[in-house]
Amino acid sequence: MGDTIKGSDGKQRCNWCAATAEYLDYHDTEWGFPVDDDIRLFEKLCLEGFQSGLSWRTILAKRENFRSAFHGFDFEKIARFSQRDINRLLKDEGIVRHRGKIEAVINNAGRAGELIEKEGSLASFFWRYEPDTENLAKSQTVSTSEESVALSKDLKKMGWKFVGSTTAYAFMQAMGLVNDHAANCVIRGEVEQARIRFKRP
């Protein structure tokens, strides 16, 4: 039972979602459920990059501010950002004001457009890195995987930035490429059913 905690409803959930009230809803309705929407995939990869060196709690609290600052993470619009936009973002107290991470999002928006031209969608590319099998014994005890290392390496080859293997793995966990809910977490079964129903792009 060490990897779960009992909620106010008496149900077991992954330990980490007890850290803050915001985590509970994110854990129950988003984390691990499969995603094939390109905007959501791009947003999550960007936010994971912003999280580097920080807590997810910080990013989640600022998520709506990020969405407003980056035009809903519409990568076609972001790819056209100028120095004026960078200056605006560096003054925006509602987001993480880190020049390298801001410039990475703008750079990655351009790379996303290139990838879609080549692959048809971001989803069809990212879902290639879904593992063939899942190892429950390693659930939430690792921060990278063979697949996340490969995804990170391939993205970097294409010019993406702030996409290290740990960032890639956190992205894969959140977007449902792996089901890393604890074995006895009440949400694990829901995620697994969603993954079974999910049509891979």
Image (cartoon, grey):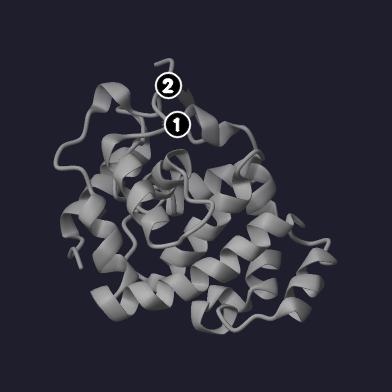
From the top left corner, tell me how far across and down residue 13 is, in percent: 44, 32
Q: Amino acid at mark 1?
A: Cys
Pointer 2 with pointer 1, Cβ within 8 A: yes
Q: Amino acid at mark 2?
A: Asp
From the top left corner, tell me how far across and down residue 172 is, in percent: 36, 48
Asked whether, in this view, residue 71 is left or right of residue 188, the answer is: right
Q: Hey, which quadrant is residue 4 in on the image?
A: top left
Q: Which residue is mark 1?
A: 14
Q: In the displayed structure, would residue 79 be above or below residue 141?
A: below
Asked whether, in this view, residue 48 is left or right of residue 188, the answer is: right
Q: Give the mark, 2 or 1, whose residue is nearer the N terminus.
A: 2
User: Which of the image's four quarters has the N terminus?
Assistant: top left
Front residue of 72 and 8: 72
From the top left corner, tell me how far across and down residue 61 is, in percent: 69, 53
Residue at image position (47%, 50%) is 163
Q: Which residue is mark 2?
A: 3
